[in-house]
Amino acid sequence: MFFEATCKIMKVNNTRLMYLYEAQRCGTMNAASEALDVAPSSVTRQLAALEKELGIALFEKGRRGIKLTEAGELACEHYRERCSHEEAFLSQLDKLKSLKTGTIKVAIGEAFLSDEFSRLISQFMADNPGITVEISIGKTNHVVELVKEDDVHFGLIFDIPRDPKIRIKLALPQPLKVILHPSHPLIKSRIITLSEAAQHRTALPDKTYRMRQIVHMAEDENQTFIDPELTSNSLLLLKDYVKTGKGISFMPEIAVKHELLTNQLISKPTDSSLFNGTKISVVSRLGRQLPNSADLLMRRIQVYLNESIDVLSALNTSG
């Protein structure tokens, strides 16, 4: 019978359990009514309804004060545990809301990796010591899939493909440009045509990169073929190749921001409409509500990206 009563308690109205708890705590119906700020008859009705619902007596009749039966004690204990669990639950929510705990999962393209980006993440973790940040590195299509499957909270990508399940939180122009060494012969050109670039030694990302796919589309559009001397799945290796002065590559400026600011590399625009129309984007799954901590990190990254674009724009203007 106690098992049956316990199962029923799980479904019972929490208000009736509260009335029972206050009645046993206060000792009398009148005292409970004062504590609850209701009429004594209301307490009596609620307790009668609770006994009827559970099918068992909860307090001994005929006493001047409240004396719980074993079932009544069980019901009160359940109420106390329920309140305790609710308090713990709300406490954990408060911690998450105030960024004291939690895990943020982000996926980014390799083009965004830099010492400056690493410092941003480190500073965020220092400001929020209870937060764990998981960063996954991947190519555009892979990052988009992680976002769509809710494996990450949001993603940072180059030139987003069209996808109805993806929501663009921020999009900033970031053309694909010719990246070269200051001593390279093409340094004299203000705008470099693809046919002109095709005459020089070139290093390109492999075909799984969105950058390479755009290069291929631009080749078709301009009826030009670029035969790379070096192909790699590492942007770091491509940058090192260009630094030797042997050849050129095609990248967004944000991928070589440090090298541009320190004059190790130079960027030049092209005449390609495809190259000039690319963007960098912060994306999340359409309809997903980000937790406060993830939303805060995303906003910091958005500020960082805006500032980076401003710095690069100023560099191009001064150049």
Image (tube, grey):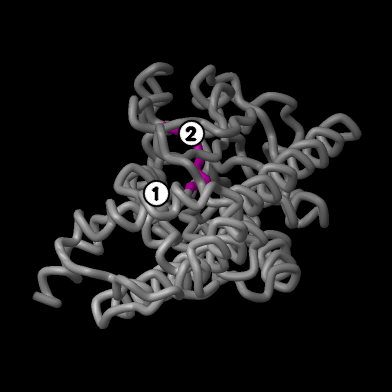
Instruction: Identify the main secondary structure in magenta.
Output: strand
Q: Is residue 187 left or right of residue 32?
A: right
Q: Quadrant of residue 114?
A: bottom right
Query: Where 140 falls versus 270 (above or below)?
Result: below
Q: Secondary structure at mark 1?
A: helix
Task: Name which residue lies at 61% across and 61% down.
Answer: 94
Cα gap from disc 2 to disc 1, whole angstroms: 12 Å
Q: Find residue 236 and report its image quarter.
A: bottom right
**Quarter assignment of residue 285:** top left
Q: Choose mark 2 or mark 1, whichever is in front.
A: 1
Three-letter code, disc 1: Val
Location of residue 67 in the rendering, given as x and y in whole percent from the top left corner? 38, 79
Q: Which residue is mark 2?
A: 159
Residue position for label 1: 143
Extreme bottom residue here? 70
Residue 201 visible in this rendered orientation of the protein? no
Examine the rendered structure and indicate whether residue 212 appears above or below residue 24: above
Left or right: where does residue 246 sit relative to residue 71? right
The crowd level at tag 1 (other Cα within 10 Å; few <14, some 14-19, many 20+) is: many
Q: Is residue 176 visible?
A: yes
Could you tell whether 317 is left or right of 177 in the image?
right
Point out the image quarter for the N terminus. bottom left
The disc label shown at residue 220, or none: none
Q: Which residues are magenta?
A: 154-160
Residue at image location 76% in from the left, 33% down from the top: 188
Residue displayed at 64% across by 69% down: 100
If you read the primary sequence from the N terminus, does the residue marked by circle 2 or circle 1 appear first?
Answer: 1
